[in-house]
């Protein structure tokens, strides 16, 4: 396990007083490790968790060639001549193949079998004429006619193993079990999957001016909103949240809270108390109990941040030393969300064992002029939508003041203005990081 100083020494141009956002991400990548414990869970419970092993297909899916349409199955060789000579192919219907009930008798030239979607292709037949493409000619639907040029051999047949071929990888370790992956595992008949255990994340708010819900309003005090946004962000990721409420700015209370959090959790998130000139004990306690770096990040919003490890000796646990990764976020509600989405989320995903923790950036056209100074990364709250012409566009959602949570509530993504970037003209393409509607 590398110390904060060792990691810092590995980074080029590490300056804790003006740390570029990219360096924060690089630092966190070196700091965190995936949790190692795994467990076998039934599929529904495995939803949202991270696979602890590759899943190989032990079956072909689908297990047999089958029809992709409702129609008529026949031997496609007969189309070659008919198409060449522009003649209609007439076929006699000799029976019906249903999904789950195969047609097992031989089908000869000039014959076909009525077939439903998903039904096994009768032996020797490779082509399905969809019912809307054929003319039913004989009495009681006993013959059909297929006009030339509409079909070729092999059409509308799904091949055995075309979804998953036996012996090939279906899912990879490190993939999060989203709905499609859960369905894919189920298509192999797997009732259980081996997943990493969920991450346990403890959260508390600090600051003497912070009121818990239920307390009466008080002069100079504000309600604790961070606890709720962080809870929501963690739950969206499938973390187990240990909610520790508001901790008053008092050394004994802070020490107790940090220690309890470090014993129980893999990661501790706090908000408040990391700004320069804070008249509080939060930073002092982080220093006392752990190996922690204090940064001024070259970003807006969200400049102050503390990151490291909190260590405690745990007499109850088997290992005498227990540590948890610390993310000390600024107090500002908008800064909390931005630093969480930009840095904490990818780091936690890495701890969850995800192999793909970085959020994708999309390109959207800015409807607004945006002022931006080069030399820091700025995040603006934006509403991203698709125009009728199919372009992504984004508009800034009103007041971008760092204390204005309303414009965050009206946004579905963050406009990411990179370190070196300057002003943005209206109509210019910008990067956006979606946080709603995609994840
Ligand atoms: P700080 O980082 O402690 O200087 O806090 C910056 C600003 O965020 C101050 O206006 C605080 O009152 C506010 N703030 C801090 N913690 C919270 C919280 N948990 N909920 C809402 N606002 C907060
Ligand atoms: Mg404060």
Image (cartoon, helix red, strand yellow):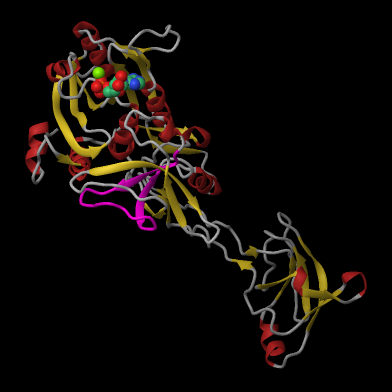
* 165 on left or right of 288: right
Q: Measured along the vertical axis of the image, is residue 350 above or below residue 198?
A: below
Percent position of residue 260, x then y: 27, 13
Identity of the residue drawn at 14% across and 26% down = 292
Which quadrant of the figure has residue 311? top left
Residue 430 part of the magenta segment:
yes
Residue shown at 25% from the left, 11% from the top: 316
Quadrant of the image occupied by residue 131? bottom right
User: Does the magenta-highlighted stretch encompass residue 15?
Assistant: no
Is residue 265 among what the camera can see?
no
**What residue is rendered at 43% in x and 31% in y?**
406
- Residue 165 in picture, x, y percent from top left: 48, 60
Viewer-proximal residue among 423 and 55? 423
Ligand 1, by image quadrant, is top left
Q: Which residues are magenta?
A: 411-434
Outermost residue, bottom side = 85
């Amino acid at each position: 396990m590398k110390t904060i100083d060792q990691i810092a020494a590995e980074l080029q141009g590490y300056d804790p007083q003006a740390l570029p956002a990219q360096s924060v991400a690089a630092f966190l990548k070196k700091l965190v490790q995936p949790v190692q414990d795994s467990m076998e869970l039934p599929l529904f419970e495995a939803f949202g968790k991270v696979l602890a092993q590759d899943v190989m297909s032990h079956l072909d899916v689908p297990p047999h060639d089958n029809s992709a349409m409702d129609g008529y199955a026949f031997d496609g060789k007969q189309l070659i001549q008919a198409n060449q000579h522009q003649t209609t192919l007439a076929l006699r219907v000799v029976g019906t193949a249903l999904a789950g009930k195969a047609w097992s008798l031989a089908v000869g030239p000039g014959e076909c079998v009525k077939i439903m979607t998903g039904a096994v292709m009768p032996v020797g037949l490779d082509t399905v004429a969809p019912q809307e493409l054929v003319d039913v000619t004989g009495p009681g639907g006993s013959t059909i006619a297929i006009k030339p040029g509409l079909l070729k051999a092999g059409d509308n047949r799904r091949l055995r193993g075309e979804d998953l071929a036996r012996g090939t990888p279906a899912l990879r370790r490190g993939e999060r079990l989203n709905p499609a992956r859960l369905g894919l595992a189920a298509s192999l008949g797997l009732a259980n999957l081996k997943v990493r255990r969920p991450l346990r994340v403890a959260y508390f708010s600090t600051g003497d001016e912070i009121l818990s819900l239920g307390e009466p309003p008080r002069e100079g005090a504000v309600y604790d909103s961070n606890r709720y946004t962080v809870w929501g962000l963690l739950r969206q990721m499938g973390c187990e949240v240990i909610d520790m409420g508001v901790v008053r700015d008092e050394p004994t209370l802070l020490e107790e809270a940090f220690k309890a959090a470090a014993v129980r959790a893999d990661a501790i998130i706090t908000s408040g108390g990391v700004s320069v000139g804070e008249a509080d004990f939060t930073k002092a306690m982080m220093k006392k109990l752990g190996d922690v770096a204090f940064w001024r990040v070259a970003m807006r919003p969200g400049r102050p941040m503390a990151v490291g490890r909190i260590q405690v000796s745990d007499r109850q646990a088997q290992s005498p030393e227990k540590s948890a990764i610390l993310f000390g976020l600024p107090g500002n509600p908008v800064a909390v969300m931005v630093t969480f989405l930009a840095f904490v989320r990818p780091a936690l995903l890495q701890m969850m064992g995800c192999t793909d923790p970085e959020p994708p950036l999309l390109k959207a056209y800015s409807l607004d002029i945006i002022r931006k100074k080069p030399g820091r990364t700025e995040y603006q709250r934006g509403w991203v939508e698709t125009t009728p012409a199919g372009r992504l566009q984004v508009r800034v959602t009103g007041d971008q003041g760092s204390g204005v949570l309303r414009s965050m509530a009206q946004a579905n993504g963050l406009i990411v203005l990179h370190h070196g970037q300057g002003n943005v003209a209206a109509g210019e393409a910008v990067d956006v990081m979606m946080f709603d509607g995609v994840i």
